């Protein structure tokens, strides 16, 4: 169809993303974005506009700005003008402003701006001003990187015959044991928010063989720590016909290597800006038995280092084990396998006969980012494990009966996306990698 508009100077050009302007040099263009920087001189005012793709310096007469626009930082604008080459600015071009339309004003007293240093801005203020954080040159990268992390997770698994599943988060029972369940009034029944897609991913292996899911899960976690949320995004994997947990650890190693290699290529500058440098190869991450970890900790840090660790590791132990792996293998990551079985969820398979579990944690840069393992795959074993933990099998009947349909030996793992993002970028608190953190004290924004 032909445009009815005459091709004159007055025809409004379509909006172009800043990163796509270069071929339009010398032409009249329209951009949209936010006022990122303002520099006023006697005659000329330089307005740097930022959109999702980059920034562009726009030049306007100071008198005109004062009389007509009175631009402020973070105002939302549409700018039309002529695009000219200018070797003095970073992207080699600037816009001579013909007109500016203010789409929305930003308030005058902002707590920070997209171009300011926010080292000293508190976590609280950052959470209360999300759009500004996302617009911020550095902080916005956290969430772009997180999106890429999840995309790469999906990409690798899809390439390796895994099928993505989407399972319900409204469930009739807990899956992980413990009391950290959110109760829900579900008409005349009680339901819970899913702690993980554990049961469903296992069941789906019974038909699809290799599955993964990404989605929010819920833990009524009363502690306010830098590593716990009440709602987090779980990257879950499960696969059938396995021989043991080593195969699952190997899969995760390959998956992380794939993700890290791409991130090292695409996000080299971001990693450098966050002060963490390139991500390591996971090839050399050792696999240590739980008992061996305690011995290593005792040897390196003294017997106080293992006090209270009879069932699980704590934050300090996780940090120290990564330090030890770094020293010995030049890799800041450790797989810990063979945790005490009685302290693991009922679905966990036994490792030998000495009370150890076929389950593992992956510690990365000082923090547990993954739990995984081999599961029980026969109904009788699951019933026994439930009873052994004082749980009544009939309460799990809808899950147990799936194990009469031919369930292959299987296992898998789950990575907390916020924890992984925080460790990749070297963030001290996982709230920095959570758009809208939920914890005991926070329900808004
Ligand atoms: P687990 O309960 O260890 O295992 O959770 C797996 C991973 O999820 C992350 N994570 C959390 N992140 C933020 N806040 C929390 N409160 C929180 N709790 C856990 C961590 C952790 O390593 N079903 C098993 C997984 C499996 O065996 O496949 C499970 O949920 O990164």
Image: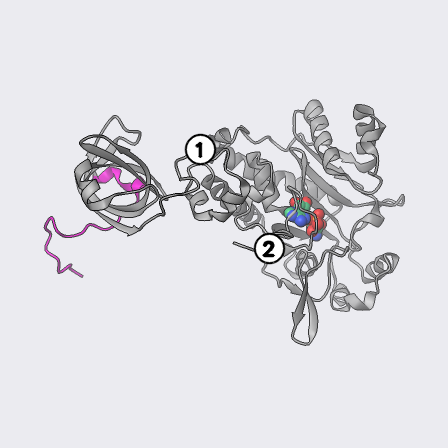
Q: CA distance from mark 1 to mark 2?
A: 32 Å
Image location of residue 358, percent across then percent down:
79, 45
In the drawing, does residue 155 fall left or right of residue 37?
right
Residue drawn at (72%, 37%), measured in percent from left and top?
315
Image location of residue 104, percent across then percent down:
31, 52
Tell me: is circle 2 under 8 Å from ligand 1: no
Can you name the residue that lies furthest to the front here?
109
Residue drawn at (55%, 29%), measured in percent from left and top?
276
Q: Which residue is mark 1?
A: 117
In the picture, the disc for residue 66 is: none
Q: Which residues are magenta?
A: 1-24
Q: Is residue 301 above or below residue 345?
A: above
Image location of residue 88, percent across then percent down:
26, 26
In the drawing, does residue 33 fall left or right of residue 132?
left
Residue 99 is one of the magenta-drawn residues: no
* Residue 223 visible (yes or no): yes
Nearer to the camera, 203 or 395: 395
Residue drawn at (35%, 42%), measured in percent from left and top?
53
Image location of residue 290, percent across then percent down:
80, 37
Q: Which residue is mark 2?
A: 216
């Amino acid at each position: 169809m032909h445009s009815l508009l005459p091709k004159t100077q007055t025809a409004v050009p379509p909006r172009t993303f800043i990163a796509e302007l270069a071929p339009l040099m010398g032409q009249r263009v329209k951009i949209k974005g936010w006022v990122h920087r303002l520099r006023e001189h006697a005659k000329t005012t330089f307005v740097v506009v930022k959109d999702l793709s980059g920034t562009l310096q726009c030049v306007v007469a100071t008198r005109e700005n004062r009389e007509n626009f009175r631009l402020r930082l973070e105002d939302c604008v549409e700018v039309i003008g002529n695009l000219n080459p200018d070797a003095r600015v970073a992207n080699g071009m600037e816009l001579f402003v013909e007109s500016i339309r203010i789409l929305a004003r930003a308030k005058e007293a902002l707590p920070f701006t997209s171009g300011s240093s926010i080292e000293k801005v508190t976590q609280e203020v950052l959470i209360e001003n999300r759009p500004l954080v996302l617009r911020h040159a550095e902080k916005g990268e956290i969430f772009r990187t997180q999106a890429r992390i999840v995309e790469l997770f999906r990409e690798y698994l899809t390439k390796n015959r895994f099928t993505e599943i989407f399972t319900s988060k409204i469930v009739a029972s807990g899956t992980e044991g413990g009391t950290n369940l959110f109760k829900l009034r579900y008409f005349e029944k009680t339901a819970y928010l899913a702690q993980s897609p554990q049961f469903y991913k296992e069941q789906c292996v019974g038909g699809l063989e290799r599955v993964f899911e990404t989605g929010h899960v819920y833990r009524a976690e009363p502690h306010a720590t830098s590593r716990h949320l009440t709602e987090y995004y779980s990257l879950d994997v499960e696969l059938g016909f396995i021989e043991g947990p080593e195969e699952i650890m190997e899969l995760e190693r390959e998956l992380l290597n794939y993700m890290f290699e791409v991130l090292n290529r695409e996000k080299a500058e971001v990693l450098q800006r966050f002060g963490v440098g390139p991500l390591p190869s996971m090839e050399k991450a050792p696999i240590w038995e739980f008992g061996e970890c305690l011995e290593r900790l005792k040897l390196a840090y003294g017997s106080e280092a293992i006090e209270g660790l009879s069932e699980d590791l704590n934050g300090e132990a996780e940090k120290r084990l990564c330090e030890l792996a770094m020293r010995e293998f030049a890799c800041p990551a450790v797989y810990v396998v063979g945790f005490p079985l009685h302290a693991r969820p009922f679905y966990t398979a036994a490792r030998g006969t000495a009370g150890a579990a076929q389950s593992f944690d992956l510690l990365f840069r000082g923090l547990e980012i993954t739990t995984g393992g081999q599961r029980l795959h026969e109904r009788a074993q699951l019933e026994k494990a439930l009873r052994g933990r004082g749980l009544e099998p009939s309460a799990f009947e809808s899950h147990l009966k799936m194990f009469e349909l031919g369930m292959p030996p299987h296992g898998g793992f789950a990575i907390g996306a916020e924890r992984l993002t925080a460790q990749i970028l070297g963030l001290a608190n996982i709230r920095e990698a959570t758009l809208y953190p939920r914890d005991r004290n926070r329900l808004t924004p």
